[in-house]
Image (cartoon, rainbow, N blue to C red):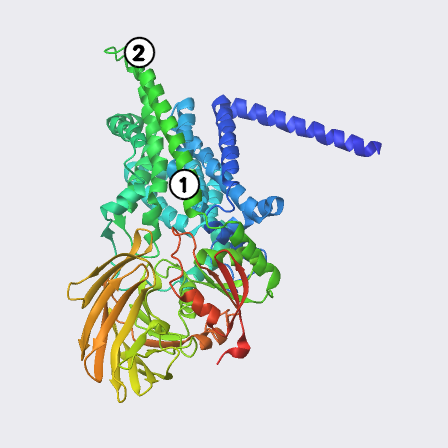
Amino acid sequence: MSSRIELTHRIEQAALRAVAALNRFVKNRLGFPFATLLGVLTIIFVVRCCVVAQHVDMGSDIATYLSTMNTLFGHDVAGVGLNRPPLIGLILKPFALIFGDLAGVKALGALISVAIGIPFYLLAKRISRPWIAVAMTLVFVLMPAYSDMLTWGYLTMFGMFFIMLTLHFLLRVLEEPSWLNIFCTGLSASFVVGFHQLSLAFFAPLCLLLLVALLAFNRLKLVRNFRPLVAAIAVAVILSIPYIPIYLKLLRLQAPAASDVPLISLTPMTQIQAGFDLQVDPSWIPWLLGIVLLIPLATVTLRSTWHKDRNLVIMLLVAFFYSLALILFVFPPPFLELNRRAHHFLYIPLWLLAGLSMSYLWSWQRVRHRKAPLWVPKALVAVLILVLLSTTILQSWRRLQGGLDYYGYLDDIRWDAVERIRENTPEESSVAAYPETFGWWIEAEAARRTANVGDRDTLPLDYLRERSLVTERILSRNQGFENGNLRLATTYPYGGAPGQPVLGVYAGGSYHDVMVFDHSNISLSMANGEVANLAGNSEKEFSISGDGDSMTMMTRYLIDGAQVVQTATLDRGSRAATISCNIHSDGIPVTRLDIPVFFGFEPESVSIAPDQTSVEVVQFLRPDTDRVVTRITISVEGATVQQAVAGDDQIGLSFSLQSNEATIAFGFDVAEPELDSDADVIHYDVPEIIRNTGLEHLSAIDFLAVDLKPNPNLASAIAWGTEEWLNACPYYKLVYREGDIRIYEVDASTLP
């Protein structure tokens, strides 16, 4: 017992000595400003942890970090191994073990969001006065863009952290080429490679440009330290070797870029605005004024600093103009994402330059400028710092709160559904999920293989795009055909009426049902006063014919001597589809035909021409995004349009027939978005897809998990009629229903 007490006492004494040594190191080597910075960063960390703890999740990308962690530690749910650099999974593991998956991944995000201030301060204190360096570090950490990034995916912050650390040690190598600085430079650079492929795509050209600039403007220093620099590069390469197989795999998994993508093009002004996150907001005015005022001062300061620390000036200018170029120019895949995130890297040299300029202004009296009192420059710097800090804190708080509401997906109901899947499905199950964010959490937390509906225009990996297309087809009724622009699907052979064509449009990276024919609501009025319904009062025949150039699905209905033949046609590469009805009566004449055309999504506007033979429908698949404009042309023979009325969910159309035979044709032409495809018309069968997906590592689908109304900022709601079809389909068994979440088990015994 006494030995245990003695051991405890020794541990306590060692801990106290370690804390005292750390305090002495901070005060003596790093100084009181750095200790103050650490204290303020700790407060920011605690506040951010408290804020994000109020939401179930913190953006959907954090689910992919958990999936990487699971794969790295031997639980490869997707079946394809690591599909991204692994170090995020390694550093996340202790957080997940200590706090749990959700709390751990959020705590790690809050930590790195403040930790990026440490390497920034190491760079800033080289060129700025200590307290100004502290102030610029706080402004940098509190950037609204970084608060926003914390809520949608903070992995880029790790890249920024190690890029700044690499630049810091690289400058040290050029000044003091010790083996410690050489190793730290290479180690930091290898961490950039191991954390994030996008950061590597930014970092590699930056280093190359920096070396070229040093060779051009500071050749003597570069040549003098050539060997240490080569040694640092060698260390980085050697330590990065373990990640080479992953990057080679990423290249294999990624489909080649389209041939018509330009090599480099100018960024639209709207993208530049979005990149800088500039909005009409009064709180931004001090920022803009401060930057404008600091431009001439920064020019003078850089000229003065050039003679003292040429390497630093070269690094700042290269980082600034390189980041600016990524904002102004659009690069082809796989570098396209850099254009969207370049402004996050631009803030690094921007605020370093601001700190340098303010330090120069603070010391203005040293040049014996006597036209103004000596306290004026200091007062100006103090006011500018206070304004920057106050506006930054305000904007950061607003962006953090707004981002959690905007990007957050999980709530208690959705989280319960994920846990339901984990607890009540076999471990080897495969789940088709809508939307993508729901699938991410099923894979990350429930540990089930998933195929998710995602934006195929932005999904980076080919196998993910293939899985997305499979899931879209599974949700599109029982079979159909598509030409890359449009999709015509049908509920055949289930659902009462075998036809019921559904028109889908490729918009926002996936197909979306926009127009629906529901045959249970299509009726014929006879001359004897009887009313017949296509779905319930007819004998039916169905067939699909055609080839890659054109396909037609035909549905024949026989009702008391009347025959209705509906044909739906789709041609190769076309932006238009045709759905027509031919009515022929050998017995009691048909006098009236009522055909409602339902909207997959509630329209923004419906414009019906005075002659009632053309209609324009504007729909938004998400609020203010993914605008779809469909023009419907109605042509008739042997009939006249009696009525065309637009409601909330449909256009009610009535036709009066003058003879025993009439044809009514609907031409659906998509005016927006501008679709461009020359793909063949492809026919697919959903039961066959469920039985055999044709995908590697995901042979069949066992469950279908659907969120009927996800966060409108992340994905659109399920189109009208989809839930009814899912509930009526005999090979789907509803096993979970809570809120807007539906989980169906596939009954393989009923598949045709």
Residue 265, percent from left and from top: 23, 52
Nearest the camera: 25 or 405? 405
Q: Quadrant of residue 501?
A: bottom left
Horizontal side of residue 479 vs 421, given as left or right: left
**Image depth: mark 1 or mark 2 in front:** 1
Residue 700, percent from left and from top: 51, 72
Residue 713 higher or lower than 311, as above or below: below
Crowdedness near tag 2: few (<14), some (14–19) or many (≥20) residues, C-alpha within 10 Å: some
Question: What number is the disc on residue 402?
Answer: 1
Crowdedness near tag 1: few (<14), some (14–19) or many (≥20) residues, C-alpha within 10 Å: some
- Residue 147 in sight from this viewpoint: no
The residue under label 2 is 374
Residue positioned 39% across, 59% down in the render: 459
**Proximity of marks 1 and 2: CB atoms separated by less than 8 Å:** no
Residue positioned 25% across, 63% down in the render: 645
Q: In terms of sequence position, does the residue under pointer 1 or pointer 2 come before the other? A: 2
Residue 283, percent from left and from top: 32, 30
Horizontal side of residue 12 vs 718, given as left or right: right
Q: Quadrant of residue 381?
A: top left
Amino acid type shown at disc 1: Gly
Nearest the camera: 608 or 391? 608
Residue positioned 22% across, 84% down in the render: 661
Residue positioned 32% across, 22% down in the render: 360
Q: Secondary structure at mark 2?
A: loop
Nearest the camera: 627 or 267? 627
Residue 567 higher or lower than 746, as above or below: below
- Residue 341 in sight from this viewpoint: yes
Q: Secondary structure at mark 1?
A: helix
> In 3D space, how far apart are the residues under numbered discs 1 and 2 (Cα atoms)?
43 Å
